[in-house]
């Protein structure tokens, strides 16, 4: 039977364990340490109930008040957003040309517009805004719907064939598919259209007449386009849907109708203004 005894050297009792004459001193943890330890255990139990803690098979215990890092992060983000908008106070009510002429507004709008372009527009218009087949280049000075600050602003707000009440809308008829023109007439007018920008292609008088009768109302007598109609200039070498007689024939036969989403309601008003200012400044603004 183990026997506790007093150790004379240290003045402490032993635990009573003994191995071949070696005895173990009993040195208990300091009381303060022990109490802190007990308090931690009690605290941990409380913590389990209050905070998310135990993993379950497909979920986890949520805690009484349902705190989450996610909602904290969202609140943080929204706080940051509010601060950002406060920074731009006055910008929301400023007319577009005032934003352009006020250096502090302009600086903010350019940075904000550039960031918003990368997030929302680059997937279609390309990260450099140079577009691609079906998606117009926003860097050049060739505009279907107008390159003035106000025009660009309106296009961004309401979109093109977007379904928005105030969208820009104009549909080129299916000349070939709906039998308005015969196959030969489609080829004839397409050849005439290509001859306007490509000297290697020779157009005919009948093609010119077909154009005047069927196309000039939207694209203009001189085929230079009309921003009221969203009808592109057909005399430059800039093609949304591809260059060449064959590509033009395809368009005349059954036109594509590009869709650009409306951003009002999706982006805040300051961001939409910023985008208009940013796009206008890319080099092609009028
Ligand atoms: C889903 C693809 C898509 C996204 C995203 C998109 N656009 Fe467009 N955008 C288009 C298409 C397609 C057209 C051409 C519509 C047509 O054929 O008339 C267009 C046209 C435009 C035009 C008119 C060009 C002209 O010549 O008049 C502007 C300006 C424009 N987009 C700006 C933006 C901005 C700014 C954003 C981001 C907030 C954006 N777009 C996001 C597809 C998109
Ligand atoms: C009701 C108006 C309207 C009429 C009439 C019309 N167009 Fe168009 N056309 C448009 C619009 C709008 C677009 C732009 C389509 C888009 O953005 O998706 C377009 C686009 C085109 C394009 C594509 C240009 C490019 O850059 O790729 C060609 C080519 C074209 N039209 C040729 C013609 C010809 C030829 C005729 C006559 C046979 C004609 N159009 C009649 C409105 C019209």
Image: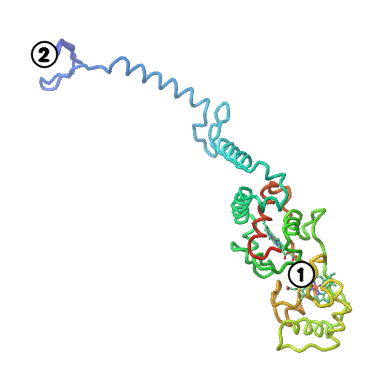
Residue 190: name its quadrant.
bottom right
Give coordinates of residue 236: x percent, y percent.
72, 77
Give coordinates of residue 137: x percent, y percent.
66, 67
**Quarter occupied by the N terminus:** top left
Circle 1 is placed at which residue position? 256
Give coordinates of residue 183: x percent, y percent.
83, 83
Image quarter where ligand 1 lies? bottom right
Vertical relation: 188 (above or below) 88 = below
The nearer-to-camera label among 1 and 2 is: 1
Query: What label sits on residue 30 in the rendered view?
Result: none
Query: What label sits on residue 9 in the rendered view?
Result: 2
User: Residue 11 vs residue 206: left or right?
Assistant: left
Distance from the alpha carbon under mark 1 to that under mark 2 = 100 Å
Residue 212: name its quadrant.
bottom right
Residue 204: name its quadrant.
bottom right
Determine the residue positioned at 67% across, 60% down.
280
User: Residue 207 vs residue 52: left or right?
Assistant: right
User: Residue 43 vs residue 180: left or right?
Assistant: left
Vertical relation: 162 (above or below) 182 = above
Secondary structure type for disc 1: loop
Give coordinates of residue 244: x percent, y percent.
71, 81
């Amino acid at each position: 039977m183990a026997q506790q005894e007093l150790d004379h050297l240290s003045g402490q009792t032993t635990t009573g364990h003994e191995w071949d004459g070696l005895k173990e001193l009993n040195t208990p943890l300091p009381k303060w340490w022990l109490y802190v330890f007990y308090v931690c255990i009690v605290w941990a139990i409380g913590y389990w109930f209050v905070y998310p803690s135990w993993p379950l098979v497909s979920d986890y215990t949520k805690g009484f008040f349902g705190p989450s890092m996610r909602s904290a992060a969202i609140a943080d983000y929204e706080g940051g957003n509010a601060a950002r908008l406060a920074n731009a106070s006055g910008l929301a009510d400023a007319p577009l040309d005032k934003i352009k002429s006020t250096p502090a507004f302009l600086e903010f709008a350019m940075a904000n517009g550039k960031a918003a372009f990368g997030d929302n527009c680059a997937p279609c218009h390309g990260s450099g805004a140079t577009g691609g087949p079906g998606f117009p280049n926003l860097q050049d000075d060739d505009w279907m719907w107008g390159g003035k600050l106000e025009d660009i602003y309106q296009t961004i707000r309401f979109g093109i064939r977007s379904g928005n009440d105030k969208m820009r809308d104009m549909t080129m008829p299916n000349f070939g598919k709906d039998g308005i023109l015969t196959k030969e007439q489609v080829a004839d007018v397409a050849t005439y259209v290509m001859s306007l920008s490509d000297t290697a292609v020779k157009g005919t008088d009948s093609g010119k007449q077909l154009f005047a009768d069927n196309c000039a109302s939207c694209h203009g007598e001189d085929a230079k386009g009309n921003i009221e109609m969203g009808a592109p200039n057909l005399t430059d070498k800039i093609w949304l849907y591809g260059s060449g007689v064959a590509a033009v024939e395809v368009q005349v036969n059954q036109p594509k109708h590009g869709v650009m989403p409306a951003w009002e309601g999706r982006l805040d008003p300051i961001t939409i203004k910023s985008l208009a200012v940013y796009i206008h400044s890319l080099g092609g603004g009028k």
